[in-house]
Every structure is written in structure tokens, then in C-alpha cells.
Image (cartoon, rainbow, N blue to C red):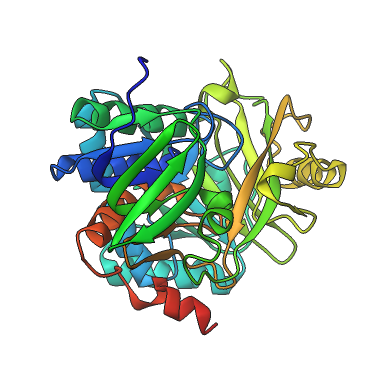
Amino acid sequence: MAVDELPAEVDIAVVGAGLMGSAAAWAATRRGHSVALLEQFSLGHDHGSSHGSARIVRRAYADPLYVRMTGRAFALWRELERDSGQPLLRITGGLDHGEPWHTDGIAAALAEAGVPHELLAAEEAQRRWPGMRFEGRVVFHPEAGTVDAARAMDAFVACARRRGASVHPESPVQRVSIAGGRARVETGGGAVTAHRVVAACGAWTADLLAGLVPLPELTVTQQQVFHFPRRDFGADWPTAVHEGAAAHTYNLPGGRDGGPGDGRKLAEYLAPDGEPTAPGDRSGVVSPAARDRVTDYVREWLPGLAPTPFNEATCLYTSTSGADFVLDRTGPVVVCSPCSGHGAKFAPLIGEVAADLADGGQPPDPRFTLAAHSST
């Protein structure tokens, strides 16, 4: 990609070109705004939270708000596919099992929203999907699968650039200041003045906005994911989330990272030994204890996989105390932190929300506001 010249002034400067920042750039350019998209690393880098070829997309939440949001997000994923000409979603259906509070809450919320789903006994689910074992009742809903995160970022950026966005990889933002109701964004290669600045920089949000915006506590941890080979290449398993008495895991088709055998991606949700870290101090070393726990889980619950991981990686989770997103604006600064480990599926919707906020709109729900987080 050719290097764009940094403009002196734009309507919206977006800091961070991961899933959320690139989605915000796409949304803003579709509204006719001039946009500068700034990224401290190369595009598609693996230093943060957006890399990889497979993330879960699904409708299953026990919270009606998030169920509604997933519906809007799915429609926008399809719009991005049309806009980019790239297939990004793989629909497999989704499974949830484990404690009754988990499955019953999801089934109730899906029923309230009119989302098709089934409640199955564990034995029935095991007959339907050989090689998987289940705890308690199982919720299956067909509107679930995976999104290719890396290709989605490419698509967001390409479509935004086609509409006039300037894109600036390897351009770390050194400082954001506010004067006269506008933001000045300074990089090593110059500065840009913006009517609005969208901070979509994940684990780096607190560093960027320190002293500028009263942020809630954002906890950054290093988490790990593993890929396991499949014994049977014939069965196309749904994505699965297990919230059990002693298990808090998710698994999904690994996409390109799963190799030609469609290896399975598996991880714990906020593993207990996830290392608190500053983004620049991330070790990148997988926890042996996490590897052992996940391998033991595969032996017990996923006998259709060989219990030896062939690939493993780390990523950063940025979490709020209540697992809700931070999506709000103060002055010319839009805070875009859809974090807590479940934001990727909402990326195109988060981009729309960021553009709404930049245009003077309100957060999609009061719980996403800075004020709500400061009171928790």
C-alpha cells in the first residue's frame, strides 16, 4: 500500500487500526467524513487484540441488549462483505452448555428477541455432534459462526480508503491535545487537527487519554489461545461456549490458523493466570499451566480432537469491572473501548456507534457511558 500524506485537518482522526478503529473509519467515510486512520504498528499486526483468522460471531447472550446488538452487527457484517466483495463470515451455528444460569438465561433472552434456537439434552447434542461432550442442557442457535478478523480489518481499511480515508501505519500517536473544541493529534511524522478524534486503541487507551478523559479502570491481561487437530475431518462442529462448574471455555473452527485440517481453536475465557500487563511489556509467553488445563479439557470434553496443541498464541484482553463496553464522547474525544473479551463480533456496529458519537449522537445504552463506569 502506498504511503498516504498526513493531512493537516480532517473531520475525524481515528487512533488505532484494529477491528474497532478500522470499522470506525469505514463507518465515518460512508457518511462522507474526511478521515485519517493512525496506527502505531503495521496494519494487521499481532501486538494487540484483533489479529487471527477466526473469532466467534453469535446471537447468544443472556442480556437482551447484547442480543439486539448482535442482530445489528450481523447485518453490518453482511454489508461489509458486499462493500468489499470478500466473504468474511462462516456460519456453523453455536452451542452453549454448562450451568443452568448460563443456558436458561441465554434461552430466555433469545426467545424474547425472537431468535431461533433449540434446547437439547446433553445426550441428544452428543448424538448430533459426535466427538463433543456436554454438561447440562444445551442451547443451539443457527445464527452463529466465525468471522475472519484479519481479512475483516483489511476489508474495513480498503473500503475506507476507497472513500477517501488516509491511512497511516507505523505512525504512533505521541500526544492528543484539545483547543477550541477540536483535537490536535501529534505523531512523529506531523500533526493533524480533527473536529473529533476516536480513540480505538485497545490496551493503549489509558496511555493515550491519561489526563484528557476521566476513564474507568481498564485492566489489561495477556491471554492465550490454542489450536488442536481434529480426529474426524467430516463433522462440521458449531462454535461452542462452556460455562460449567469447573470450565469457562470457548472453541471454534480455527480458520486459516487451523491449517488444512480445520484445526479447532480453544481458549479459556479470562484465564485465572492471565498475566496483568502493560501493553508494551507483554511477554508473549504462553502459560504452561493454561496449556495443561486446556489440554485436560480437550481430553474430557472434546474427544474428537487430538489432545496435543499444534499452534498456540497470546493476545491482550482489556476488561472493565462489569464486562460492559465503554462507548462515549467527552468534548471532541470519542472513547471506543468495546472490551472484556467479547467485542470482536460487534466490530462493524461499534464502528457505527463511534461515527454516531462523533456526529453528536448518544451512546447506545446508558451502561456504556463514562459516568456509568465511574459509578461501578
What percent of the width, then of the height, locates residue 14? 36, 45
Q: Nearer the viewer, residue 195 or 222?
A: 195
Residue 230 lies, with reference to residue 48, above or below; the image says: above
What percent of the width, then of the height, locates residue 320? 57, 67
The answer to whether one can see residue 126 in this image is yes
Q: Residue furthest bottom?
A: 375
Residue 19 lies, with reference to residue 194, above or below; the image says: above
How many numbered circles are shown? Answer: 0
What percent of the width, then of the height, locates residue 352? 26, 52
The answer to whether one can see residue 58 in this image is no
Q: Nearer the viewer, residue 119 or 350?
A: 350
In the image, taking residue 103 as reference, residue 222 lies left or right, namely right
Q: Quadrant of residue 368?
A: bottom left
Q: Quadrant of the C terminus?
A: bottom right
Residue 204 lies, with reference to residue 99, above or below; the image says: above
Q: Residue furthest left?
A: 32
Residue under the image location 52 percent in, 35 percent down: 40
Q: Quadrant of residue 38?
A: top left
Residue under the image location 47 percent in, 27 percent down: 43
In the image, taking residue 302 as reference, residue 257 lies left or right, namely left
What percent of the width, then of the height, locates residue 373? 49, 76
Residue under the image location 57 percent in, 59 percent down: 206
Residue under the image location 37 percent in, 15 percent down: 1
Q: Nearer the viewer, residue 225 or 228?
A: 225
